[in-house]
Amino acid sequence: MNTTITIKNLTKKFGDLAAVNNVSLSIEPGTFLTLLGPSGCGKTTLLRCVAGLEEPNSGEIYIGDKLVFSSEKGISEPSGKRDLGMVFQNYALWPHMTVYKNMTFALEIQKLSKEEMDKRVKESLAEMQMTGFEDRYPREMSGGQQQRVALARMLAYRPNVFLMDEPLSNLDARLRMDMRTELKRLHHISGATTIYVTHDQVEAMTMSSKIAVMKNGVIQQMDVPDKVYHFPANLFVADFIGNPKINLLPGRVVEKDVVDISGVRIPVQTFKQTGEVVLGIRPEDISIFTSPENNTSEFRAYSVLPSGAETTIIARKGDLELTVREMGVSKIKMDEKIWLSFKSSDINLYDKESGNLVTS
Amino acid sequence: MSVSAVDQRKSRQKNQANLRKFVRWLGTPQVLLSIIMLAVMTYMVIIPLYRMLVTTFTVQEIDLRSIKDAEVGDFTWYHWIRMLTGKIGKIMTFQPLVHSLTVALGATGLALVIGGLMAWMVVRTDMKGSNTIHFLATLPYIMPSWTIAMAWEVVFKNHTTGGTPGLFEFITGTVTPDWLAYGALPIIVCSALHYYTFFFLFCSAALLSIDSSLEEAGELAGASRWRVMRKITFPLIIPALTSGFIMTFSKVMGTYGGPNVLGVPVKYYTLATMLRSDTGLGNYGDAFVLAIVLILFAMTTVWMNQKLVGTRKSYETIGGRGFQAEKIKLRNWKGFLTTLVMIFQFCIGILPILVLLYSTFMLRSGDYSLSNFTLAYWIGKGDIKINSGEPGIFYNPKIYMGAWNSIKLSVLTALFTSLIGVVLGYAIVKGRGTRLSKLVEQISFIPYVIPGIAFGAVYISMFTKNVLFIPPLYGTFALLVVVSVAKHLPFSARTGVSAMLQVSKELEEAAALAGANAWTRFKRIIFPLTSTGFVSGFLLNFISTMRELSLIILLVTPTTQVLASMTMRYQENGCEQQANAVILVLIALVLIGNFIISRFRGGSLAKGLGAKA
C-alpha cells in the first residue's frame, strides 16, 4: 500500500464562498494526515473532494498515479473507482442490513467468492475486536460498537487509502480515548495512507504523522505535530493549537534581542525584525519562582487553578495577563507575588501586520 | 507549432473538457430524473394550463352564433368581455364569485372555531376520552365531502324545489324555512363540518408541540392564564391556524359536491357549479374564464399565506421535546363537556350515515312511515315503477362497473403517485441547492393552488387534441388517472421528499464509495429504507382518490363513471334513494381502505393527514 495523494490548486466553491481555496498538497505514502481546523474551515469539503463526493470547481487530484479529478481535462472518476475507504461521522451503517451484509456489500460488487467474503468479514471483525457480531443490526449495538463495525466494513474491502470524517466526534470521552488507540494501531499495522478530519487538536496531535491546519479554505501550516505545536507558522495556528492556550502578547522590539511587553523587557533570540510584533509563548515554557531570580519579572498570582496532574496559574502585572502551567500541584496561593522567567529559545515572534512567524 | 495552433489546441481541449463535464452532469441520476420529471409535469400541468388560457382568447365553434364574421381559432376578447362585464358578467361570474367567497370564508371560519376549540379542549384540559374524540374527528373527513350535504338534504329539504318533504318537516309538521333548506347557510355548515378535521389536527399538533416552558415563563413573569394564552399560546399556533385556513379556504372554493346538492336546486351558484354548467353546455371559452378566476383567487390566498406566515413558520420547529403544560381542570364540567363533544361528533360523523341509510329504505322519498319500507334499492331485481327500472345496488351492473372503476382509478392513481413520489423525492433531495431541483419542486407544487374543479376544466382543453405523439385522451379512463395523478403531484413531492430526507446522505455516499452504481444504490439502500413511507402514502392516495368528485366531475363519461360521480348523477336525476345508497357503498369502500391503513401504520390516519398537510 504505497499510495501518494497529490492535490493541485484545488478550489471548491459553494455559491461565492470558496470552501476550499486553491489548495495544493502532497501526501507521502503511509502518512496519517490530519486536516485540523474550526468548523467551516473547509476540511471536510477537502476530504469529500478527494472522496469524489463533491466535484471541485478547479484543480487536479491524483490518487497514486491515477488522475481522478481534473477540471481542465473534464475528468472526475466516481467515488467507487478511486480505491478509497471512508468512515463517516455518523458511521453510515445501513440500518436495514446486518453487520455481515454491511460488510459484504462492497465485496458483492467486487464479485468475490463466498469463502473469500466470509474470510474477510471474519478477519476485519477480529481486527476491530467485534468477532461474533455478524448477525446484529446496527440499532442493536452501542455507538462505540457501531463505530468499530464501520471501521471493519472499510477494512473488509481493503482500500489503499482511508478517509475519516470526524469519526470519533459522536463518542463519549472515554470511548474516544480507546478508539484513538485503536485507530493509531490500525494505521500502524495497515500502513494505509490516511486522511483524517477533525476539529479536536488532541486527536490531531496524538494520532497524526502530519497535521494540516486549515482556515477559510486555505492550509495555514502543514507539518509534523511537534513542529506545528512548537513552531506555529502564524498567529491563527498558534492560537488554535494548545490547551491552555498559548500566550500571545503584543509588544515592541526595543533592542535587537529584547522585546518590550507593556513595560516588561523580555530577552529573545536575535532577529532582524523591528517595530511592532506579537510574542508567543506556551504556558509550560514559562518558569515560575517564589522569589526573585536572574532575568525574572515580578507578577501577581491572580488565580490558581489546580487540576491534579498540573496547575494553571493566571499571572498579572498591570494590564498584562499570562497563563502559566506548572506540573503537579502548585504551592502558590492566590494574590501571592511570583517571579516569571522566559527562555528565549521557547519564544516565537510574529509580525503584527501579517501574523506570520518571524523567528525560526 | 505556431501560436494560433497552440491556442486552437487549448480551446479544443477546453471544449472537450466542458463537453465531458456536461455529459457527466446529465448522467447524474438526480439530473436525469429531474429532466424526466420536468417533461412529465410539463405535459400534465404546464401545457394544459397554457391551452386553457389560449382557449379563452380564441373563437370556439359555439361562439360563431354570437360573433359575426369570425372563424374558429381567431383571436378574441369576447369571452373575457362577456364574462367580466355587464349583466352576463354579473350573473355568470360575479354573483357566483361572491357566493363562493361567502361559502368559503363562512365554512373556513366555522371550521376554525369548531376545530380549534375542540383541539384546545382535548389537549389542554383533562377531558376524558381524548383518543375517541381524535378518532371521531377524522370520520367526517374520510367520508366524501358531500356526504353531510346529502344527509342534510334528506332532513331539511322542503317543497321549494317541488320535491318531497324532509325528515324535519315530517317530524315537526312545520315547513322548513328556505334559508335552512338550501343556499349559503347549509353549504357553509356542511362544508365546515367536513373540513373542521384540518383545524382539529393542525391545532392539536401545534398545541402539543409547544414547549410548556414558554408558557411557564409567561406565568412566572406574572401574566394571568388568559393573558398567557392570548400573548404566547395563540401566536405560537398561528402558523398552524393559517395553513389550516388556506387549505380549507381553497378546498371549499373549488368544491363541487355540497354546492351542487344544496345550492343548485335554488339557483345558488358558486364558481364551481357555474363552471360545470358552462362546460355542460360546451361553452369552454366561458368556463375557462371562470376557472382562471377561481385559480387566481386560490393563488392569492396561498401567496398571502406565505407572505403572512412565511418567516413565522420557523416557530413550528421550536420545542417538541419540551414538557407538556399542566392541564386545566374541568372539575364538575368534565363529564358534561365530554358528553357534549361526543354527541356533537356523533351528529356529524355517524348520524349522517344513519340518515342516508334510513332514506334508502323508503319506497317513496319523504314518506317516513313503516309501510313505505323497502329493500328494493338494495336487492330489488328492477321494477319499472322504482327508479326507472334500475335494479337495486347489489344486482345493478352499473354500480359494479362504477365500483370497479373507482377501485381501479384509486389503485392506479395511488400507484403512479407513489412512483412519481419516489422519483420526485430523489430528484429534489439529491439536487438540493441547485436551480434544477428548485424548479422541479416549484412546478410540482402548482396543482396545489388550482382548485379541483378548475383542474378538471384545464384537462378538457388539453386532451381533446393531440399533444406531440400522445393521442387525445378525452372520454377515456386514462384521462381520469392522469388528472388524479397530476392533482396529487404536490402530495407526491412532499411524501417523496420527506421519505428521502429520512435517509441520511452518508448512507448513499458510503454505498458509492463501496463501488455501487446509482441503480444498485437505489435498489439496495434507498428503496428499502424509504418503502414504508411510500406504502402509507399509497394507501392515503387510494382513499383520497376514491372520494374525489370535484376533480373528475367534468371529465367522466357514461362508460368511465365512478361511484362518486354516480351519486351526483342519481341525485340530479331526482333519485335520492339510489344516490344515497351509492354514497354508502362508496363510504364502505373508503372505510375498508382506512381500516387497512390503520392496520398498516398502527392506527393513525390522523398522522397521515397531518403529514399530508
Image: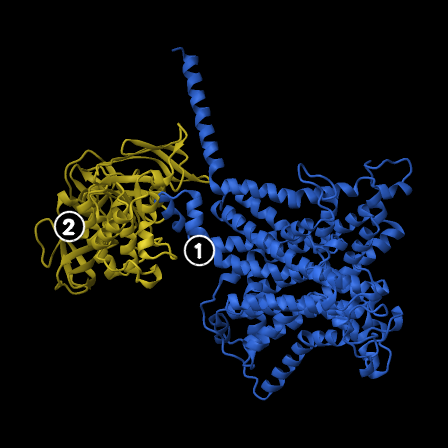
**Which percent across, then down, holds residue B402?**
71, 60
The quadrant holding residue B128 is bottom right
**Marks 2, 1: nearer the viewer:** 1
Q: Is residue B393 above or below residue A284?
A: below
Give residue B529's mark.
1
Q: Is residue A301 above or below residue A27?
A: below
What is the chain letter for disc 2?
A: A
Colour assigned to chain A in the rendering is yellow
**Which percent across, then down, holds residue A1?**
21, 39
**Which percent across, then down, holds residue B471?**
69, 40
User: For the residue marked with disc 1, what is the amino acid?
Assistant: Leu
Q: Is residue B575 left or right of residue B611?
A: right
Give residue A78's mark.
none
**In the image, which lettered chain appears blue?**
B
Q: Residue at x 86, y 83 (%)?
A: B173
Image quarter hosting the C terminus of chain B? bottom right
User: For the residue marked with disc 2, what is the amino acid?
Assistant: Asp
Query: Which residue lies under the disc numbered 2?
Result: A285
The residue positioned farthest toward the top in the image shown? B2
The residue positioned farthest toward the left in the image shown? A294
